Amino acid sequence: MVACQARAAPGRKAGAACAAAGAVWQRGAVTDSAPLDVDLALLGGGGAASLLLAALDRHGVRDLRIAVVDPVRRRGQDRTWAFWGDPSADLDPLLSASWRQVEVATPARRRVLDLTPLRYAMLRSGPVYDRAAEAERRLDAIRIVAPAEAVTDDGARVVVRTGDGRVVRAGWVLDSRPRPPARAGRTIWLQHFRGWWLESDRPAFDPRRAVLMDFRTPQPARGVSFGYVLPVSDRYALVEYTEFSPGLLTDAGYDRALVDYRDLLGLDPAGLRVREVENGVIPMTDAPFAARPSARVVRLGTAGGATRPSTGFTFSAMYRQADQVARALAAGQPPVPKPAYPARHRWMDAVALRALDRGGVGGPEFFDRLFDRNPPERVLRFLDGVTTPAEEIAIMNSTRLLPMIAATAGDAAHRVRDRLRPARPAPAIPAAVVGGPLRPVSDAET
Ligand SMILES: Cc1cc2nc3c(=O)[nH]c(=O)nc-3n(C[C@H](O)[C@H](O)[C@H](O)COP(=O)(O)OP(=O)(O)OC[C@H]3O[C@@H](n4cnc5c(N)ncnc54)[C@H](O)[C@@H]3O)c2cc1C
């Protein structure tokens, strides 16, 4: 048998191209010496790739030769995705919880928002990875458990060399490996957080509503902090402390912040146990992520710009783009999604980040006004990047005018300076600070 070398022309299904060529391709026949020919190589098998595999399966794509290259086979609960949207037949069976009501709290007030017709939802990674593994099996994809290293695109196909010496030749590469932005941004912040999955002996949480953002936490000198609570029952919840700021805390710093937030919530440490810990770092920057670094390489997920600069939310854009790519492939089109966010949203985010970073606007005040002066549905759809220009004008009108004008002018001047001087490389996104083994909640206070 020979491996099929036919490549998909845009508008033509790749698998069909192979069939038309009368060739047969080998599944799983990867040796160190023989290159593996595939239609699609997924580099990275995390969130974006898992959603893509599930979408390919959902859209009935069956005739593509697919390879997934990742040194790690993702399984289990390594992260929790929170997102909002319409209830969906696809995702709802996988959710751990969803809420029609959420709370946004500032030192000035606590407001309960009714999200109808949307809902805020919590999806743990385990069911997403399981579904992707099932899709991978049905798609007959080949898994290579090694890092992708050199990626060379000659415009007709892409050659990928893996860390274990293999060569994959792909019609298209969908690359979601972590990558820094193409160049440094004007504002370079991080969203960094630690969450505790807390189990309580007694009813301690209200499972009817989530706390979306609680700005009553002490605010950092430069940046924004908030806590949140995602309850799955009255005795079990994810309680998280998050900062939007330039640098990370120490291990003890995250624990201290979580203990303080637990106390702010009035939770009794004596009856609580930390069952799991989640740590994360997400870029929040107006730096550009290269979504299409070469003709046949498409970046997805955080590396492709799916992380919203002003919030760090990524899931909805990843899901949207996975669906677009799968639809395109099912129709025999090139697997190129729309940009994760419209350019005008990226500009508004750049201005908002600048205003927050340069101290023109306080974080709690900024979000307070946003939720005060707009229906929650509008704010949430804006944060997902799916509002109309008219809605965006209403959103802009709800922010304080003078600091936003100053940030807009500063952003424009900075863009001009950027054009005149050589681009600076973007700093690498640091790894999350991971603590030691699980301890009882009260131990963390020492
Ligand atoms: C703990 C945590 C919680 C989050 N919660 C939310 C949330 O609530 N809502 C939200 O919208 N977003 C959230 N995010 C942000 C975002 O949704 C996730 O980071 C998401 O997993 C991004 O998907 P991705 O595919 O871009 O990256 P990842 O899921 O990180 O996948 C990247 C993959 O690339 C692989 N890889 C690395 N190097 C190589 C290599 N050389 N070759 C091949 N593969 C390689 C890795 O092993 C990994 O599997 C969270 C992030 C974290 C870390």
Image (cartoon, rainbow, N blue to C red):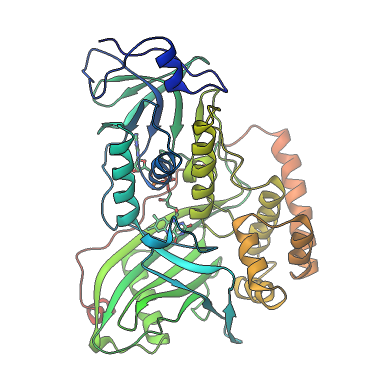
Q: Is residue 357 visible?
A: no
Q: Is residue 96 above or below residue 138?
A: below
Image spot of residue 149 (x, y percent)? 35, 27
Tell me what residue is drawn at x 49 percent, y 59 percent: 88
Q: Is residue 389 visible?
A: yes
Image spot of residue 279 (x, y percent)? 35, 60
* Picture quadrant of residue 85: bottom right
Tell me what residue is drawn at x 35 percent, y 53 percent: 128
Image spot of residue 67 (x, y percent)? 33, 29
Q: Is residue 255 above or below residue 123?
A: below
Query: Is 59 or 316 nearer to us in this picture?
Result: 59
Tell me what residue is drawn at x 49 percent, y 43 percent: 322
Q: The N terminus is located in which quarter?
A: top left
Query: Is 164 or 158 nearer to us in this picture?
Result: 158
* Picture quadrant of residue 6: top left
* Picture quadrant of residue 280: bottom left
Q: Is residue 406 above or below residue 329?
A: below
Image spot of residue 195 (x, y percent)? 36, 68
Q: Tag count in the figure?
A: 0
Q: The C terminus is located in which quarter?
A: bottom left
Q: Is residue 309 left or right of residue 361?
A: left
